[in-house]
Image: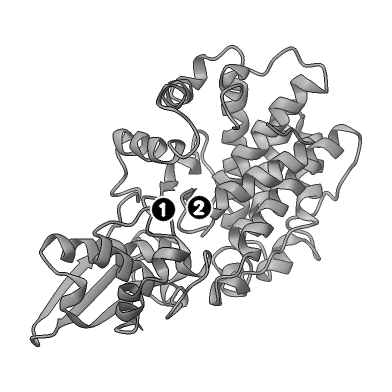
Amino acid sequence: GLRAPAAEAAFVNSISGEVLELGDGENSVIGHPGQAVVPAALAIAERLVNTEGREKVSGPDFLEAVLAGYEAFLFVGETIMPEAYDRGFSASGSLGNFGAGAAAGRLYGFNDEKMKDVIALSACAAGFLRSWNLTGTMDKDLMVGDSTRRGVLAGILAQLGYTGSDAILEGEVGFCQAMRGEARPVRRRPGEYRIRQVYFKTYPCCRATHGAIDAALALYREGLRAEDVESLVIQSDTRGSLVAIPEPSSFVAIRFSQQYAAAAALIAGQATIREYTEDFAARPDVRRLLKKIRVETDPSLDEGWPERDYSRRITATLKDGSQKSAYVHDIKGSVPNPMTMDEVEAKCRSLFATLYDTERTEKIIRLCLRLEELADLRELTSLLGR
């Protein structure tokens, strides 16, 4: 029931989206645009109506803002990734401000000059580090919220007359040089939208662990059970091997552990928000199985990145000495192996059930599926929140 200024509302909602590790993303950029863009667009849409005198914001207005935000996030990301990621910068933290800012600017109806100011005001605060990757600490979610807040603030400030540098991206001391050393040239054809390359997550954890889950579940369906395992090896690509916290226990750490991903899947036969809790991670059977799992880097799995989507091979040695293996090429939710609309709706229902009754949940889903027809976005936003 609480209300907040637009930038702070976007901050809180962005963290709320990020912390579940169930958002969307794009492989080559290694980031998650939705957690920044959607909260920003919602916040500015409500600000325009509630405090700036706009009669209404339509569903198409909102969708255009979301599209603009995704394209800004992914376009800028393409100029610096994956090199900036390898240097230690978080993609979502460093790009979310661009996505949030562009969404805000689109809703404000900015021309090119004003949108340039939004991008510049967003960029000058970019550059969040991903050291949390190694231990799974809580700063991961905070920095995504901060990035989103900065983009929303950039839109508001540009509307008030703030200006920014013309050369913030490709300039001598600009964003791309700081993040990568130089800007990678990016070319787009008319009508080419990178949002079409966005994946959806099926499990509430870092996507680099999803291949381990898919492979473990494949073995589970073949009859393998945790109590039969003597040892288990996860063969991973080079980047995925960095997401390998051996015995995680904290809320964040378990989401960034390939070992935990495989253990939870083999014990529960699924990987949902129920398995991704500190209580489940503390179970004796989980702790025992974790000690039997190790991650190995297999450089051959790097081939074809990012089109080859987090390929994984796991091999379980059983107590009788026999072995069982599973290999996953395109993980569920990837562009080559997408979730169906029925699966996306089921994911929504499972999450909304923690807050809403069935009637409210179904209303929200129906409105989201016909956003392009909504004359007034308040039809949807009036149903959101507690």
The amino acid type found where label 2 is placed reads: Leu
Q: Residue at x 59, y 38 (%)?
A: 38
Give SS at disc 1. Answer: loop
Give SS at disc 2. Answer: loop
Q: Name the spot of residue 207 as percent of width and height, x first.
A: 42, 60
Q: Which residue is mark 1?
A: 273
In this rendering, the label closer to the viewer, 2 or 1: 1
Q: Is residue 110 left or right of residue 303?
A: right
User: Outermost residue, right direction?
Assistant: 161
215 lies above or below 367: below
Q: Which residue is mark 2?
A: 20
Do callouts 2 and 1 mark residues in contact (Cβ within 8 Å)? yes
Residue 57 picture quarter: top right
Residue 235, numbered label: none
Quote the CA–CA distance across marks 2 and 1: 8 Å
Q: Name the spot of residue 336 as percent of width and height, x first.
A: 30, 49
Q: Is residue 302 left or right of residue 82?
A: left
Q: Residue at x 60, y 71 (%)?
A: 132
The amino acid type found where label 1 is placed reads: Ile
The residue closer to the viewer here, 304 or 66, is 66
> Tag 2: Cα neighbours inside 10 Å, few (<14), some, or many (≥20)?
some
> Tag 1: Cα neighbours inside 10 Å, few (<14), some, or many (≥20)?
some
The residue closer to the viewer here, 180 or 101, is 101
N-terminal of the two: label 2 or label 1? Answer: 2
Q: Quadrant of the N terminus?
A: top right
